[in-house]
Image: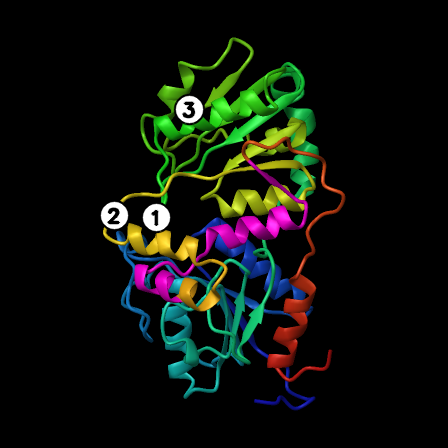
Amino acid sequence: MTLSRKHKPVVWAVAGERVGDNQQLFRAADAMGIPYETKTVILKPGEAAVKPKVTASLHQVDLARSSRLEAPWPDLVVTIGRRMSLVALWIKAQSGGNSRIALLNAAKGKADNFDLLIVPAHYQVKSTPRVMRIGLPLIAFDEGKIAAARGQTASTIGAMAKPLHVLLLGGSTSHQKLDGAAALMILDGMRKTFAGQGSIYVSTSRRTPAGVAEALARELRPQDRLFAWTAGSNENPYAGLLAHGETFTVTGDSLSMLTEIARLGKKLVIAELPRRDGPFAALRRIADMAASVPVLSALSRSASGELRDFKAFYKVLTGGGHAVLLGQVPEMPKQRPSDDAPAVGRRLRELLGLDG
């Protein structure tokens, strides 16, 4: 598709309910430098926990609560994630195949039906002309919010004993396990390596399993502090911690937080989580051992259902001097990671047939 110079391109950014996904989506769309329309898709109750087969479908969408999807159909759909990819494919089908699709992250099926795949380095996918490889995900925390939080939390977080070491906990994944024992090992590793002095602020998240906060609370000192996330709570110390923290230790499942903190140029420590036992555990171990042989690694990860290579993600950060693994002393990075958003914007404009 090549647009005439008189044609004003119609672009839809199809957004779901995941904050981290939407942040990447809008950074990509903004980077085009042309107007676009946001289409918000709300899933039916329970559908967010389901991994649907990738096909052109709206079966999982709550149509009454979502933006209207109707002609005139767009020239380009930009979206992210498995569930939104179904919506994008449905839009393309309604347009008679004329709408092009740019999907952020790896396709979970029907890869050839997408016109552009914008894939961060930790995804294991076959390189084709449709694949645009980038480094880190297009995630960045608003530094204006950090500046505002600095003053708002000066008498609380800012008053804690210095240096302030921050421990941010994500949760278990299908392939990694976070429990009380793993959390205590991380805390012990911090204290033995670099966090013996000052204070530690531990923050759990929505994904942190029950019991982890209780296990950590028993081991914290009087000068330390724990924020235990609870459903319905409006409190979130994250911005204040970014403003006042000296070092940041993040569990290895939390790719979004690792990316945000790396982009801020903070002292960052990656706390790898233990592998979860399961029917495909042996295949995942083979993938790790075969990391130096890309074909073997890709085959074993594909068989285990794992498209993301977490170790490859860690290597991007540690190899670039943006982070260290737990057990090493973190240092202030010499430079921040490169931002691929401008290059993504140019590639999207090319997909529309626009100059530059």
- Above or below: residue 342 compared with residue 191: below
For marks 2 and 1 on the same chain, the one whose residue lies earlier in the sequence: 1
Which labelled disc corresponds to residue 184? 3
User: Could you say whether the residue bearing mark 1 is in a helix, strand or loop?
Assistant: loop
Magenta-highlighted residues: 299-325
Please say if the residues under marks 2 and 1 sit with CB atoms less than 8 Å apart. Answer: yes
Q: How far across and down, in percent of the image, does residue 230 sit?
A: 38, 29
The residue positioned 55% from the left and 21% from the top of the image is 192
Three-letter code for the amino acid on which mark 2 is drawn? Gly
Is residue 48 found left or right of 261 in the rendered image?
A: left
Q: How far across and down, in percent of the image, does residue 286 sit?
A: 36, 56
Q: Distance between the residues labelled 2 and 3?
A: 23 Å
Tell me the crowding category of disc 2: few under 14, some 14 to 19, or many 20 or more residues within 10 angstroms, Cα based.
few
Is residue 264 found left or right of 294 in the rendered image?
A: right
Three-letter code for the amino acid on which mark 3 is drawn? Leu
Query: Which residue bears the numbered disc 2?
Result: 278
The residue positioned 59% from the left and 55% from the top of the image is 136
User: Could you say whether the residue bearing mark 3 is in a helix, strand or loop?
Assistant: helix
- Above or below: residue 73 compared with residue 189: below
Number of numbered discs visible in the structure rendering: 3
Query: Which residue bears the numbered disc 1?
Result: 175
Tell me the crowding category of disc 1: few under 14, some 14 to 19, or many 20 or more residues within 10 angstroms, Cα based.
some
Q: Which of 163 and 304 is in front in this view?
A: 304
